[in-house]
Amino acid sequence: MPELVVLRDVQDSELRHIEDYLKVGGYQALKKVLLELKPEQVVDEVKKSGLRGRGGAGFPTGMKWSFIPKNVDKPKYLVVNADESEPGTCKDRVIIERNPHLLMEGIVIGSYAIGAHCCYLYIRGEYYEQAQILSLAIEEAYQHGFLGKNILRSGYDLDVHLHRGAGAYICGEETGLLESLEGKKGWPRLKPPFPAVVGLYGCPTVINNVETLATVPRIMERGADWFASLGTPKNGGTRLFAVSGHVNKPGTYELPLGIPLREIIFNYAGGMKDDKVLKAVIPGGSSCPILTADEIDVKMDFDSVAAIGSMLGSGGVVVMNEEACMVKVLLRIAKFYAHESCGQCTPCREGTTWLKNILQRVNDGQGRPKDLDHLMGIAFNMIGTTICPLSDAAALPVRSFIQKFRKEFEYHVHQKACDVAQVMV
Ligand SMILES: Cc1cc2nc3c(=O)[nH]c(=O)nc-3n(C[C@H](O)[C@H](O)[C@H](O)COP(=O)(O)O)c2cc1C
Ligand code: SF4
């Protein structure tokens, strides 16, 4: 059994109340940090650990923290991204439900490291119950002196505010999130300037994912070297993989970075349901290019998955068997992005709608001979041409599905029927 970092004390249980968390050594890492270490030392330790952001892009966390300017006469903010809206992803929710104080402890350590005295926790609107859990955790942390003024008599102050979103995927993009927090429409901002310099209310800001911050207390407790040794070079630690689809045991598993995808599917998720044949896997949430069954020996770390043309993303592993129609799956994904595009950029606003409309007619048996080339062309023009990466997120699946399963798409266009359905009859 691999060593656990985030779910160590809560693999099959919950530690919702602060008393239970304190019993397993909770807030000890914070004590050490506030009473023994300078903020720069915390940043250095996190850098050394090889921790990379768990929100999707895998940016090195310590490096991100070090971008916060030191000598500015402005408040600094830590913003926690609990928007968790990427289809296939449900891991931050597990942390919030099972161990909210681990996140709280990570928040205080992260805020201290960047010199923030105010933190906003932005949670997706649909996570109503999870927002209540966090609200209670914040209250308990204040009552026990882990938040507020002069935390643990260290002279350090921090306030945490919980903010509920209203159910828009684009508010998970960090600058869309900042706009939304400021009370505006969640439209992503042009970058540069980056949030580390001009972020919330124009002040230096770090935005971190829930899982990223929940990992930090363990790093401070057991050291950067221990954490780094759990993963692969430049990919420290473990991460939560949310496995869904045609497997026997769907669920959220904490496993070392670098574990082969095959092992996740066949050892941990119990293998294929009803012994059906594996056809395809989305390795890290709906925006990641699809993998075929013969690509599952890939190591699940950021660099190895990128090397075969996909992304580790937010860790949402979607497994599909031989009965999954690739046209239908892609149409479902395209509908999602067309609905969630904020509409600011022409390639994204128009492109996502055209992808959806063309895929709909291919699916409905009304596809035209040039449709597949049109889809590829539209997707090509959507990549790298917009304000935020949602456009790429919509285009990349289209390109990979058609490249890897072209015959199936052609069958739909030319035979006006579903290849998979034919096989199954
Ligand atoms: C369209 C879109 C949606 C996103 N949704 C989320 C999300 O729900 N949660 C999240 O943590 N990051 C999300 N991200 C990534 C964030 O922009 C940002 O990179 C992340 O919160 C940084 O945290 P990390 O460095 O700890 O990974 C999204 C990005 C894009 C482009
Ligand atoms: S790429 Fe799409 S979602 Fe992102 S800002 Fe442009 S229109 Fe909005």
Image: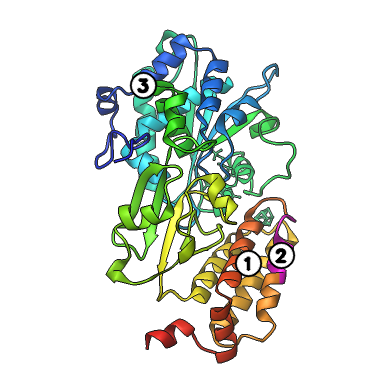
Residue on which the image places disc 1 = 399
Q: Which residue is mark 2?
A: 380
Residue at the bottom extreme? 415
Could you say where residue 413 lies in the image, as x and y percent from the top left? Answer: 59, 86
Whichever of callouts 2 and 1 sits on the residue coming sooner in the sequence is: 2
Q: Is residue 116 visible?
A: no
The picture quadrant where one finds residue 196 is: top right
Say which label, 3 or 2, has the lower sequence index: 3
- Of labels 1 and 3, earlier in sequence is 3
For the stretch drawn in magenta, what is the main secondary structure?
helix
The stretch drawn in magenta includes residue 282: no
What's the residue type where badge 3 is placed? Tyr
- Is the distance from the Cβ of mark 2 to the nearest ligand 2 atom less than 8 Å? no
Q: Nearer the viewer, residue 71 or 298?
A: 298
Tell me whether circle 2 and circle 1 mark residues in contact (CB < 8 Å).
Answer: yes
Q: Amino acid at mark 2?
A: Phe
- Measured from the top left, where is residue 415 in percent x and y? 55, 91
The C terminus - image quarter = bottom left
Q: Residue at x 55, y 74 (%)?
A: 405
Q: Would you identify the image quadrant in which residue 245 lies?
A: bottom left
Q: Nearer the viewer, residue 53 or 283?
A: 283
- Dot 1: element: helix
